[in-house]
Image: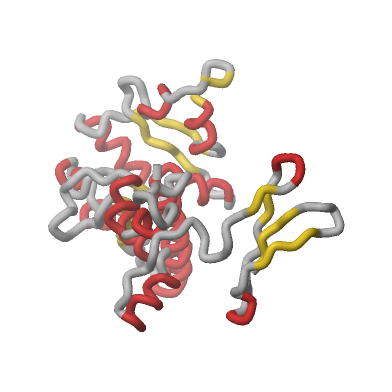
Amino acid sequence: MAGPFCAMQLADLGAAVIKVENPEGGDSARDSAPFLDGESSPFIRLNRNKRSLAINLKEPEGKNVFRELVRSSDVIVENLRPGTMTDLELDYQKLSGLNPGLVYVAASGWGQTGPYSQLAGLDIMAQAMSGLMSITGEPDGGPIKVGVPICDLVCALYGAIGALAALRVREQTGRGQFIDVSLFEAGVSLEVWEAGRYFATGEMPPMASSPSAPPRPATGGRSARFSATRSGQTTSVSRTTRRGMHVATS
């Protein structure tokens, strides 16, 4: 998801994006239910504002078509296993020779180098390894995955931000850049508050669904939660609002 979501950010900002797909069936996400008028609804959400082109990158003819696209492109986004584009002879080193101003974004599970680089990398794995799941959930329960594929999505956003920054630098240098982003690093980067606590005290952050008081049932089956903004507001109390709702404040 990181690659398509990254390219979609650029498309939403006005870039002309061409999605390269396998000529045998296209992107596997096209088969993902539910369907809307015969099209995969999740696929549509990830690939809006894009055009698609089917190219077999394993064949010489396909490689040549891709290289011609690269000559006039500003940015390439890919999320294949590290080394795959090298095997295809379409890696950054070779493509930048055709287009020195090319900005190349490579999104992967664990980064382009390191002991895990060749392993499969899924969002749930990155959430677990980065520590996000260890601080998500109820204190007496087990680790819980964040509801959305947060590592995939944040990795994509970092890729888009990096591409925009590299394009700005290119205006001054005339040269493109290689941008390495990963699901794992995206997950770790989100733990700013928890890391601050750990490096200051050496204590592992506790698991909690929220640092504030849990929500309390309210009339009509609703609930409400008030969160503290200052240390002096940490005492939880129960009160009744003018609407008759019992809420938790802190």
Compared to 39, does 168 lie above or below?
below
Quarter of the figure that contains the N terminus: top left
Is there any visible trace of residue 102 in the rendered image?
Answer: no
Q: Is residue 222 left or right of residue 111?
A: right
Where residue 30 sits, quadrant-wise, is top left
Question: Which residue appears farthest toward the right when viewing the image?
Answer: 242
In the picture, measured across the screen, residue 131 lies left or right of residue 58, that is right
Instruction: Tell which of 83 and 72 is nearer to you.
Output: 83
Q: From the viewer's perspective, tell me whether residue 32 is left or right of residue 212.
A: left
Q: Residue at x 50, y 31 (%)?
A: 42
Where is residue 126 shown, x and y percent of the image? 31, 52
Residue 198, compared with residue 103, is above or below; it is below
**Placement of the C terminus among the 4 image quadrants:** bottom right
**Where is residue 67 drawn, in percent x and y?**
30, 43
In percent of width and height, residue 148 lies at 47, 45
Q: Which residue does the image show at 39% across and 48% down from the upper left?
A: 144
The one of 223 and 38 positioned closer to us in this rendering = 223
Would residue 202 be found to the left or right of residue 146 on screen?
left
Q: Is residue 166 above or below residue 36?
A: below
Is residue 55 shown to the viewer in this render?
A: yes
- Image point (52%, 50%), residue name: 9
- Could you say where residue 83 lies in the image, as x and y percent from the top left? 17, 48
Q: How many marks?
A: 0
Within the image, what quadrant is residue 239 found in? Answer: bottom right
Residue at 53% from the left image edge and 49% from the top image edge: 15
